[in-house]
Image (tube, rainbow, N blue to C red):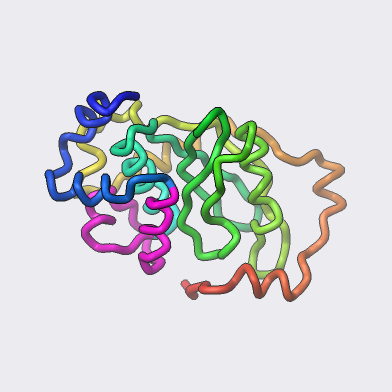
Amino acid sequence: MGPFAAMSRTSSFTPRELRSLRALRTPHGVQRALDAMPYHIASTVWAPRRVLRERTAHCLEGAIFAAAALRVLGFPPLLLDLEAVQDTDHVIAVYQERGHWGAIAKSNFSGLRYREPVYRTVRELAMSYFEGYINLRGDRTLRACSRPVNLARFDRSHAGWMTSDADLWFIPEYLVGVPHRPLLTPSMIRGLTRVDQRSLQAGLVGYREP
């Protein structure tokens, strides 16, 4: 997508908001902005404009914000849903550079955030989250991932979704219905062990209690 196309799709942002988003410059800049925001614990799905205004977000809101910011920077606004058992799903914004996949994410767990664009496939990227994807008992819980979902699909049905005052519940509702690809075989799952206490504590650095 060229700069003109990205601009035409993001014109619902104010000039000041666009300057703030363009100032992030790179996917890693978007991740730094997310890292600077406190983790927001609430049953909400704020639009990117509200996240930009409130300077706080949770996993899903952070991913949607990152997808919108990537769009301003000229990338497609792509989300990937990671599906877990006895744990919550994790949504990440994904992008490609030089044919390789990277990710931007907001998480209460320290190992489930940014990924450099070094992964050859979406599955390879998703599996990079496996060891850090644990619940509070230390169970390894990641099981499947969706295909990348381009949020541009909502430009007509939910025009202005990036700057809406309403919660964007239609996005998680759509993600739940997208086919998910298993990442582990049944025999792999049966053989899984819990992580050691040190690894669990490392994952909880910066963890905020619900």
Residue 25: where, in percent of width, then height?
33, 46
Relative height, residue 58 to residue 183 (above, below): below
Relative height, residue 8 to residue 139 (above, below): above
Residue 3: where, in percent of width, then height?
27, 28
Q: Tell me which corner region of the image, top left, top right, bottom left or bottom right, holds residue 135.
A: bottom right
Residue 97: where, in percent of width, then height?
50, 33
Q: Tell me which corner region of the image, top left, top right, bottom left or bottom right, holds residue 131.
A: bottom right
| Number of numbered labels in the structure image | 0
Task: Say whether residue 90 is left or right of residue 77.
Answer: right
Task: Say whether residue 108 is left or right of residue 18.
Answer: right
Which quadrant of the rendered structure holds the N terminus? Answer: top left
Q: Which residues are magenta?
A: 28-57
Residue 157: where, in percent of width, then height?
26, 27
Relative height, residue 72 to residue 192 (above, below): above
Q: Look at the image and say whether residue 20 sits in the magenta stretch.
A: no
Task: Say whether residue 40 is left or right of residue 85.
Answer: left
Give me the residue at 57% from left, 45% from top.
82
Task: Say whether residue 136 is left or right of residue 35.
Answer: right
Residue nearest the observer in this picture, 19 or 57: 19
Relative height, residue 26 to residue 108 (above, below): above
Give me the residue at 39% from left, 45% from top.
26
Give me the residue at 43% from left, 54% from top.
31
